[in-house]
Image (tube, helix red, strand yellow):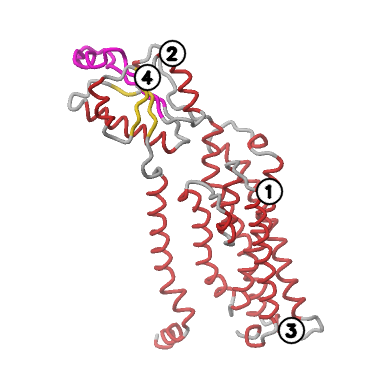
Amino acid sequence: MKKECARIFSDKKLFFTAVLMPGLLIGVMYFFMGNLMGSMFEVTEGYIYQVHAVNMPEAIAENFSQSQINIINASQSDIENIKQQISDRNTDLLIVFPPDFDALVAAYEFESGEPAPNIRIWSNMARTESMMAYNLVSGIASYHYSPAQKFTINAPAADAAGGEDYELATEADIFNMVLGFMIPMMLMIFLYTGCMSLAPESISGEKERGTLGGMLVTPTRRRDMALAKIFSISIFGLMSAVVSMVAMIVSLPNMMQLEVNILELFSVQEYLLMFVIIVTTALVFVSILSLLSAYAKSVKEATAYATPIMLVVVLCGLASMITGGAPSETFYYLIPVFNSAQSITAIISSEVSAINIAVTAGINIVFFVLCAGILAKMFNSEKIVFDK
């Protein structure tokens, strides 16, 4: 027992990865996830919700005037046009009251068995402002008419047509929204894990088995051997990432039970741009993991070093959910890994900037070249390559 404790406490790397790092990772992950969940359903500070209202009673209109809601009076003839605006995400909400709503509420008796006066509200779940406006409007209405609550909201039984679809987001809108949240994170994870399964074994594995030392005494230059390692890992990491990306995109509609044609979602140009980002991002991950693998004494140690990097990758993939989409400022795309996630988000949301995509690809390639040079220098160090 004394021997094992001495071994762990004397090895600072092992003590950190086995004892301290799990708690640190949990704390950091929960901190960012807490901020993320809070920001997903936030709108810009000071935003004024645009709510179109038909037959709104004056008494309840006074309550709306005291909130961040701009009530736009409309008539029955405007309903279809406003519904189209909501579907196109050009406005937030449409609320329709029955004529003489207050009188209907006052006269309604639960014992009658008749449907209660019904308020109809149309919204678009693909637009955060619309969802927040729906919650705010329904909450104000419920508060105004409490405690009796002699009314319903979007009750199917109260519609003459037997029920109406009050959610105006199309399947394509919902699918694109989910893609914008899921694809950047999942794709970054697939890229990283594909590279992580290859890089540690390729370098630190050979160091651990002692075969790397035998290779280094051959006439082959160490620089060439280092470059061969990093290029070969890049090829297989890229193959794994492309296969994972295709499988994920093809299977998403079935998972979400949506009838969406994948080929019609993006143009050929957008698919090509996404491929370029995937290729250059795989190079970044390979270069990072190759350096960690060369520095580590064993595959286990290299994998331990790679775990905190996974946290950074996940957070970069989730960044678009926090920021509400890809930023337009070019300086964000100078940061490796983060720039790739934002570029993928921009492609999915059809907000592609040629300059930002070019900057991302260029920065990723430069980063790969620099890391390849560092790896070649590491292979020339006897202390690093023979450290076991």
Q: Are marks 4 and 3 in contact (CB under 8 Å)?
A: no
Q: Quadrant of residue 123?
A: top left
Q: Are marks 2 and 3 in contact (CB under 8 Å)?
A: no
Q: Earlier in the sequence, mark 4 or mark 3?
A: 4
Q: Is residue 96 found inside the magenta-colored segment of the image?
A: yes
Task: Write down the residue under mark 4.
Answer: 156
For disc 2, the neighbor class at 10 Å (few under 14, some 14 to 19, many from 20) is few
Marks 2/1: CA–CA distance: 45 Å
Marks 4/2: CA–CA distance: 22 Å
Please tell me the numbered disc located at residue 273: 1
Please tell me the numbered disc located at residue 79: none
Q: Which of labels 1 and 4 is toward the front?
A: 1
Write the residue at 39% across / 30% down. Answer: 50
**What SS does tag 1 mark?**
helix
Q: Name which residue type carries label 4.
A: Pro
Q: Name which residue type carries label 2.
A: Ser
Q: Which of labels 4 and 3 is toward the front?
A: 4
Marks 1/3: CA–CA distance: 42 Å
Please tell me the numbered disc located at residue 77: 2
Write the residue at 80% across / 80% down. Answer: 220
Task: Write down the residue under mark 3.
Answer: 214
Q: Position of residue 287 (x, y in %)?
A: 65, 68
* Magenta stretch in the rendered image: 93-122
Q: Quadrant of residue 44?
A: top left
72 relative to 230, above or below: above
Q: Position of residue 216 (x, y in %)?
A: 74, 83
Q: Which of labels 1 and 3 is toward the front?
A: 1
Q: Earlier in the sequence, mark 2 or mark 1?
A: 2
